[in-house]
Amino acid sequence: MNGTQVDAAGLFDTAERKRVLVALAGIHAKRYVRHPVFLVTAALVLLGVQRAIVSPDADNGADWDATLSFVIWFGLLGLVVGYRLAVTEEKALDLLPSAPTDQRVRTLALFAACLVPVGATVVLMGCYGVANLLVPQSADAPFMLRPDTGQIGWADYIASVLEAPVSAFGGAALGIVVARWLRFAGAGVLAMVVVFLVEILCLAIGETSLLGDKLWARALPNLMPYRYWFYNPDGAEGTYSTMAPGSAVGHVIYATALCGLAITAGVLKGATPAVKTAWMKVGGTLMAVAVAAYLWALLG
């Protein structure tokens, strides 16, 4: 085989991989949309929108902070969905004319399907936005950072909103990683419970006004893949904000880097030596970005 034939074969191989990747990602995306856990989660979040309009808080208008909190469940329960998609991927492979033998293509197709909860989160957050316009909160409502009142800058405000779709992707991606590395019954549910307990504990420590001003107390919630930011002008110890100091921009970059590390971990499982070398370099870069962004999120 001469050089021209080798180049042509390489181009064909690359084009074929892309074709299979797109086709397989589409199949997994449809499976994600039809998964009962995802459908139930979406229904619960829609009920939160209805609650914000029909029975808002009497003092603060639409219960924006509570309904927005439901979005995290796309990430938490998405862990189970991602896990189930990975352990039952043969169902998707059976729908292709020929099953891809490249483990990397199969894994990346699963991660591409994680864009489904991202899209759902963005759409439903838009529904929350409409609900908030219909039943607005008062300017001094606690637990809601508002750039128009000087509580937070616009960059940090946008970043705090982006926490939800990033966590939606990250939860499903973590489920895929668990399925690739921990193949025992119930691994997905166990991982979900552990993530939930650790996340809630760390966020609870960080939001306490008596501890929230201590560096170690803020370090724990900032270490979590999901972080919400709030401002309480009437706290027991006076005005309190989780943004003082801190940076939502830094944290959303940190969370995005964690998503990249999850993809890297998934691809490394079963990869060839050449693929492992390339992705280890990617992982090293993402790790450096995650560390720098975490420090930014913590120190502001």
Image (cartoon, rainbow, N blue to C red):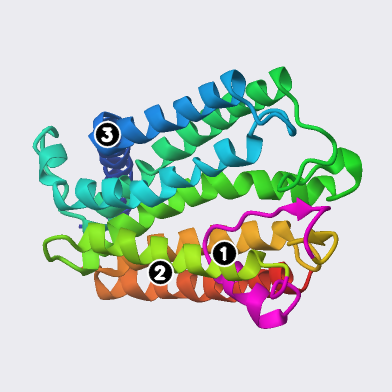
Q: SS for tag 2?
A: helix
* Residues packed near mark 3 inside 10 Å, few (<14), some (14 to 19) or many (20 plus): some
In the current view of this chain or complex, which residue is farthest to the right? 150
Q: What residue type is labelled 3?
A: Ala
270 is higher (above) or lower (below) than 157? below
Q: Report the residue marked by disc 1.
A: 203
Report the residue at 35% width, 68% height from top: 265
Residue at image point 11% right, 39% down: 91
Q: Can I make out residue 9 in this image?
A: no
The crowd level at tag 2 (other Cα within 10 Å; few <14, some 14-19, many 20+) is some
Q: Do labels 3 and 1 touch, CB within 8 Å? A: no
Name the amino acid, label 2.
Trp
First in sequence, mark 1 or 2: give its number.
1
Which residue corresponds to mark 3? 23
Q: Is residue 108 above or below residue 94?
A: below
The residue at 16%/52% (across/down) is 87
Q: Look at the image and say whether residue 95 sits in the magenta stretch.
A: no
Instruction: Please give left or right for residue 256 compared with residue 151 in the image.
Output: left
Residue toward you, 164 or 265: 164
Q: Residue 251: where, in percent of width, then height?
A: 65, 62
- Give the vertical position of 22 relative to 101 (above or below): above
Residue for badge 2: 279
Task: Decide whether residue 215 is among the magenta residues.
Answer: yes
Q: In this view, does 54 lie above or below 159?
A: above
Callout 1 crowding tier (Cα within 10 Å): few <14, some 14–19, many ≥20: many
Find the magenta span and give its range.
Answer: 210-236
Assign a secondary structure to mark 1: helix
Frontmost of labels 1 and 2 is 1
